[in-house]
Amino acid sequence: MTEQENAVLLKQRADGVTEVVLNRPDKRNAFDDVIIQQLINALETVNADDNTNIVILRSEGKHFSAGADLGWMRRMADNTRQENLDDSRELARLMNTLNHLGKPVIGLVQGAAFGGAVGLAACCDIVLATEKASFCLSEVKLGLIPAVISPYVVRAIGERQARRYFITAEIFTAQQAEHFGLVHEVCEDVDAMERRCDELLLQLALNGPEAMQAAKDLVFAVSHKVIGNDVIDDTAQRIADIRVGAEGQEGLNAFLNKRKANWVPEEE
């Protein structure tokens, strides 16, 4: 078995919770074309798994990810423009798959998150980071640009911060990342981050799985849209559809009858 064959793992963390794990700690979890395809396959697998309601994206070792693997970049430098285009489209497919995954995704960031790894974080719904985590959009140092990840990163940190950090390739801290909106919460260390993740999992377990997916889709449907008749009608149809659906009926029934909905786990 080659090193790359074991580079992306799927682990069950708890009932309904699956981890997608980057497993190249000796390479600071850098990724290449093979690992990008493995990540896409892993995400598509958990998305199709009816037993998975929540997804966690994390990495083994001291660092979340150093971004692109050096060997991969060397190969790309020798490839044709068409080969580079095909390769970049696969990275774009990874980001789009993660961003639009039909289930909530929690990203756990420790150590360095550089280059494309910032894009991975930006595509997660909830991001926790350790106090010592650091971020860098380092592409311009190599004479490149963060092109494929840019739509997600700009939405996460805003145009103003993107204009600075895309150009400077400065390292910014977890605290700055939280201020910019890339990170939701900063935790003292990895253990504290894991405990906070477990608390979030308990919170999410109280919510209807289909409703969480619909709520995520709702954000994409209304974000950056003019609040006109089309948006107003679309949102009205969305709530009407979910009210008459099985999960909506169960949730409303449970609330009105002061009982737990059938998706809420039994207390141990």
Image (cartoon, helix red, strand yellow):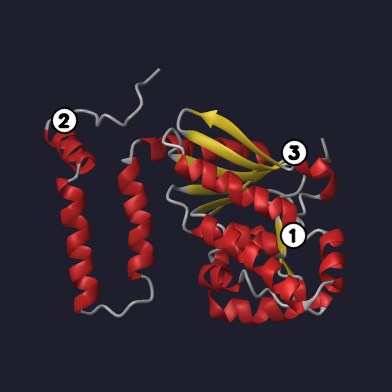
Q: Which mark, residue 6? A: 3
- Among the two numbered marks 2 and 3 on one chain, the one whose residue lies closer to the N terminus: 3
Q: Quadrant of residue 117?
A: bottom right
Q: Which residue sits at x=55%, y=31%?
A: 13
Under tag 2, what secondary structure? loop
Which amino acid type corresponds to the residue marked 1 in the rendered image? Gly
Which amino acid type corresponds to the residue marked 3 in the rendered image? Asn
Q: CA distance from mark 3 to mark 1?
A: 18 Å
In this view, the mark in front (1 or 2): 1
Residue 34: give x, y in percent of width and height.
73, 52
State if disc 1 and disc 3 touch (CB < 8 Å).
Answer: no
Task: Report the side of 267 relative to 19 (left or right).
Answer: left
Q: Which residue is mark 1?
A: 67
State if disc 3 and disc 2 touch (CB < 8 Å).
Answer: no
- Among the two numbered marks 1 and 2 on one chain, the one whose residue lies closer to the N terminus: 1
Q: Which residue sits at x=71%, y=77%?
A: 145
Q: Which residue is mark 2?
A: 258
